[in-house]
Image (cartoon, coloured by chain):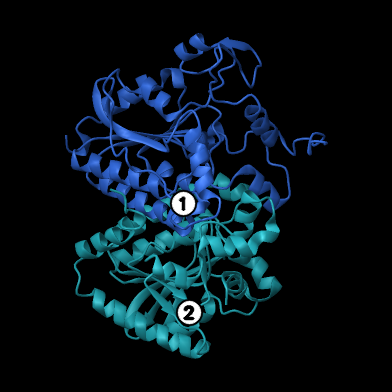
Chain colours: A cyan, B blue
Amino acid sequence: MNAYEKLLAARADGRPTAKNYIERLFQNFIELHGDRRYGDDSAVITGIGTLGRIPVTVIGIEKGHGTKEKVARNFGSAHPEGYRKALRQMKLAEKFRRPVICLVDTSGAYCGIGAEERGQGQAIAENLMELMGLRVPVVSILIGEGGSGGALALAVADEVWMLENAVYSVISPEGCASILWKNPKRVGDAAEYLKITAQDLLSMNVIDRIIPEGIGFTKTCAFLKIQLIRTLKRSRALTEEELVSQRYEKFRRIGSDFQ
Amino acid sequence: MIRRGIFKHPKNDLEGEIRRDRTPGPSVPEELCVTCPTCRKMLFRDALAESSYVCPHCGWHFRISARRRIEITADEGTFRELNTKIVSRNILSFPGYDEKLEQARRSESGKDEVVCGTCRIGGFTSCVFAMEPSFMMGSMGTAVGEKITRLFEYAAEHRLPVVGFTVSGGARMQEGILSLMQMAKTSGAVRRHSEAGLLYVAVLTNPTTGGVTASFAMEADIILAEPGALIGFAGPRVIEQTIRQKLPPGFQRAEFLLEKGFVDQISNRKTQKRLLTRLLEFHAGGADE
């Protein structure tokens, strides 16, 4: 598949969403709502559950299935309260020393009047800064679309994984094509030039692992579960300071090869 | 040939305003006289420089280069620049990017993308950064991200406060995901500086949007904004296209952000240095004194 075909696959109707992964990966999931500031963003699902026998905090951006649910989930585009809801759960995870697993699938943070009024930029910035210092392990998995800052706000992690056909980009290829060439039809070119596929990002060390999809959803989840448990067990060997400083170094290296 | 769009009305007040300030060029041209883009009065260049590039009639804040910004902020002769050799490259081999970089470097402000260094402000030693609006809309690629990160690391190491002037159209798309990652990288550096108990003051200038708003612009201890500056995550045109309705007047302007609680003060450029000095004086020595 080329970059454009992967983009379409990542957005395809019927592709498993965060909720589907949560059902498969975690037992005893208890959903917890609200940001305690303004409201409850239904584009972001947060809660606690167990992964094998490890208690974890789960945060997922949910696009929904079917028109009615998609509308209710705002098509997986979070408002600031969604990011603040996620942050509240991250802080709870830190308090109770449980790892955080993020499932990212969004075309981007919502842009609208309310989102700007309530500080979309500030909400994302705060998450970036807090995640950079969070004293528990964080693993983020891009399961579909990784749309710019809205995705990054849940993807500053010790390990960033991507499904084989997921995409991750600084701008939507449509947006890029219309800004650069005033021609949204060149989306295919933009998708290619922007280097949005899991393979591209792995080669640039932006992500750490590609999760195979060709084996079917059930097997993908089983594989993912084993890898997550292994990774979390490995991170137990690290002190909180080591964990945070390794996360810093991981992002510190990206785009730093200047003299 | 008929020029396209000459009969097009601006879709909203905001867009009208943006276009208006685009036509005469909001930067200060070399000619002797300049027309203020809002009140249309003729201004002498020398007089404008004396008033910190603020229109004496209507208070319009002209867009100014990074160098000029430092010139009006730093005590004379105290600025020492850092990391001058970090410049953008076409790391993804993005078609057309080399040409864009070349074109930007030919402009008045040359190869400046963000100017970083140390200086004294009202006698107080501080690290300072100023983004350059004329270089590809002040967009943030890996070079900008790296320079900002190094400045915060330098400031943490030398126990200095940071004063930063932001102006940006957002992340630089020609560097793809690597630009996006600069938001995380800079945020990490700001955090470490903050954990060392040191002060960071951001001055948001027109316009500050996208990935810069969603990272180091909004992470300062104290956030000042210049009057009328456009500040937001998504640009007004993108929002209008998304929601298909007109934006209210003054939306995403500095005064709007003050009202919504996202900036500490609107800071007129003419009194800005005094305000910065007072803030630096108040926090001298960081959190541990």
Mark 1 highlights which residue?
A123
Q: In the image, B181: left or right of B2?
A: left
Give above or below for A75 relative to B262: below
Q: SS at mark 2?
A: helix
Q: In this view of the protein, can residue B248 be seen by the observer?
A: yes
Give above or below for A17 relative to B74: below
The chain ID associated with circle 1 is A
Q: In this view of the protein, can residue B210 be seen by the observer?
A: no
Mark 2 highlights which residue?
A22
A62 or A178, nearer to the observer: A178
Q: Position of residue A27 (x, y in %)?
A: 42, 84
The 10 Å Cα crowd at callout 2, few under 14, some 14 to 19, many 20 or more, is many
What amino acid type should be assigned to the residue bearing mark 2? Answer: Ile
The chain ID associated with circle 2 is A
Q: Position of residue B132 (x, y in %)?
A: 45, 34
Give above or below for B3 relative to B88: above
